[in-house]
Amino acid sequence: MSPLWDVFKDLVAKEPNSGCQPTLWRYAEARHAVLEAGEIISASDAERRVLVLENPGLKGQSRITTSLYAGLQLVLPGENAPAHRHSQSALRLVIEGDGGYTTVDGERVPMAPGDFIITPTGSWHDHGNDGSEPVIWLDGLDIPMIGLFDASFVEHHPTELQSVTRPPGDALARYGSGLLPTNHQVSGSHSPLFHYPYTRTIDALERLRGDNEIDPGAGVRFVFVNPATGGPAMPGIEAFVQGLEGKSITQRYRATDATVFSVISGQGRVHFDDRVFEWRDHDTFVVPSWCRYQLEAHNESVLFGFSDRPLQRYLGVLKEERS
Ligand code: GTQ
């Protein structure tokens, strides 16, 4: 036993105080490092050739926030990252390169820049690159959460690559057009749609550009949903895209869900109370829990982001403030 009164203030804190720091990773530098990793180890030897984006306030923990992991993954032309499955769920935001693909539970999903792809818990996945350019994407996983629950399992596929058992575009045809097969049974809590092509995302953003009603003070912001439930595409992570007008600034805002942003296109700044970061195409930055910020865009910009919001909402602890 140990005395609660010595630790009470740390256990039941006045407000969020994890040490997670506002941080920005410049893509120009990160890309250089990731390509250098490509000369050191193959995707197959590494299993996943990734440089982890570790929050400097959470050293040695491979976390970008207290609950989330992020990394930049590289697959070179002709390479494969072998098939495996694990308890952790993953999301991908494709950053550069054509010709990449990821196979998820028997369907081969082509990767184009800006595409959002999910790999639900327990689904077999392997990655490859049939093109002539390196393919790089941002990985977001719930690794710290699964670690907290001590619920991690991983399994390696008996063959390097799983077999492709479904035609290309199968999930998109079944679930991606505002239609659901009449006999669809909701099973599990992940979206049965696992590919959200950027062509569709950008079309929605462009059409509603400047609309001030979608998310007042925050530009046009859309959440990636599970079309069978209307809930988030992944039960534990909410991912979104946010379109910002040129020469605009969002309202001052803070929330308890630390959020990872990846710049799809554009340039601007993120303002915190005590610092400012400049961002541009493909930079990644993190806004810690309960940290006030504003997003300023110099020109028309599109940001991608993700956080643990659905779980906080479920637990009834999500708190937001606009000021
Ligand atoms: O692509 O399966 O960044 O298993 C970390 C762990 C990616 C993946 C990561 C993984 C993967």
Image (spheres, grey):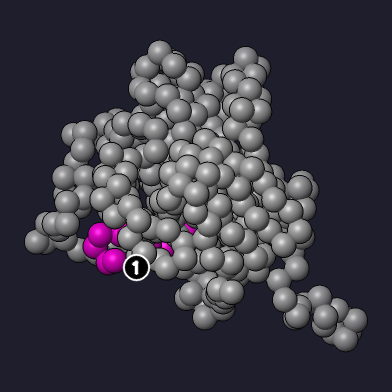
What kind of residue is marked 1? Glu
- Region rendered in magenta: 225-237
Q: Which element is circle 1 on?
A: loop
Residue at image position (36%, 18%) is 130
Task: Write the residue at 52% across / 60% down.
Answer: 250
Label 1, on which residue? 213
Main secondary structure type of the part rendered in magenta: loop
Q: Is residue 124 left or right of residue 50?
A: left
Inspect the magenta stretch and tell me whether residue 229 lies in it: yes
313 left or right, relative to 143: left
Q: Residue 165 appears at what percent x and percent y?
A: 22, 35
- Quadrant housing the N terminus: bottom right
Judge by depth and name the residue closer to the eye, 283 or 104. Answer: 283
Locate the C terminus and report the quarter of the image it occupies.
bottom right
* Residue occupying the point 49% across, 54% down: 248
Q: What residue is rendered at 28% in x and 39% in y? A: 199
Label 1 CA crowd tier, 10 Å (few <14, some 14–19, many 20+): few
Measuring from the top left, give residue 89's x and y in whole percent: 47, 51
**Residue 203 placement: quadrant:** top left
* The stretch drawn in magenta includes residue 271: no
Asked if the residue at label 1 sits under 8 Å from ligand 1, the reply is: no
Say above or below: 316 vs 154. below
* Front position in the image: 147 or 29: 29
